[in-house]
Every structure is written in structure tokens, then in C-alpha cells.
Amino acid sequence: MTAPQQRYETIADDLVRRIRAGEFPPGGRLPSNSALCDEYATSSSVVDKALILVRVGRWYRALPGREKQVADPLPTAAAVAAMIWHTDLPTGGPPDPAEVEEG
């Protein structure tokens, strides 16, 4: 039986879905941490954990001044697969890219 998702995992999944849907286009900016806290009605620590997952998946990069730029181009299949390991935090790790099929 799979454990229910933690709130930060749900938020990370939603942010990735929104990036893939074009709501946050490649090269664009993600909302500020405080805006995400308001939008998801949660604490900054939960948003911070969610953003770690999104960044590990290479969906955005951090810019100076706490801004977050959506990846351009968007991640490959290998990067998407890397985000799957998040349920194993903190002991897990991303898969070896050589073992992940592109596509």
C-alpha cells in the first residue's frame, strides 16, 4: 500500500503540472514563495520543501534575489524521472541518468 502524499509533494506535483501546461512558460518566472504560501494556504517550510522537489527535477533554476526562472528548455524524460524519487526523501536519490530512457 502506498502512503498518502505529503502536502509538499502535492504542491510540487501541481507546480510541475502547471509548468508543463504552460501556465509558467519556459524562461518565465515562478511566483514568489510568499505568493505560493498564500495560493496553497500553507507555511513557508512546506512551500520550500515543494520547491526543492521541483528544482531537483530541473523544472526551474534559482536566480539572484530569490527569483525562480522556469527551465528553458523544459526538462528531458531523465529529469522528469529524477523527480519520482522524492517519496524516498531524505535517504533516496535520483536515478542514474544512464539507466533512464529518453522519450
Image (cartoon, rainbow, N blue to C red):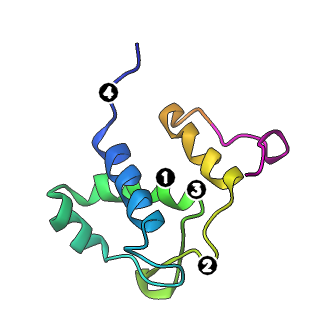
The dot on residue 72 is 2
* Residue corresponding to mark 1: 53
Q: Are marks 1 and 3 in contact (CB under 8 Å)?
A: yes
Which mark's residue is nearer the viewer, 2 or 1? Answer: 2
* Mark 2 and mark 1: Cα distance apart in space: 18 Å
Relative to 83, say whether 69 is above or below: below
**Pair 2/4: label in front:** 2
**Category of crowding for the residue at label 4, using alpha-carbon neighbours closer than 10 angstroms: few (below 14), some (14–19), many (at least 20):** few
Identified at 18% across, 55% down, the residue is 42
Rendered residue at 61%/51% (across/down): 80
Answer with mark 2 or mark 1, whichever residue precedes in sequence: 1
The mark lying in front, picked from 2 and 3, is 2
The N terminus: image quadrant? top left
- Give how far apart the Cα atoms at labels 1 and 3 are: 6 Å
Residue 44 percent coordinates (x, y):
26, 60
Q: Residue furthest right?
A: 98
Q: CA distance from mark 4 to mark 3?
A: 21 Å
In the picture, the disc for residue 4 is: 4
Q: Which residue is mark 3?
A: 57
Mark before the other along the chain sequence, 2 or 3: 3
Residue range corresponding to the magenta coloring: 93-103
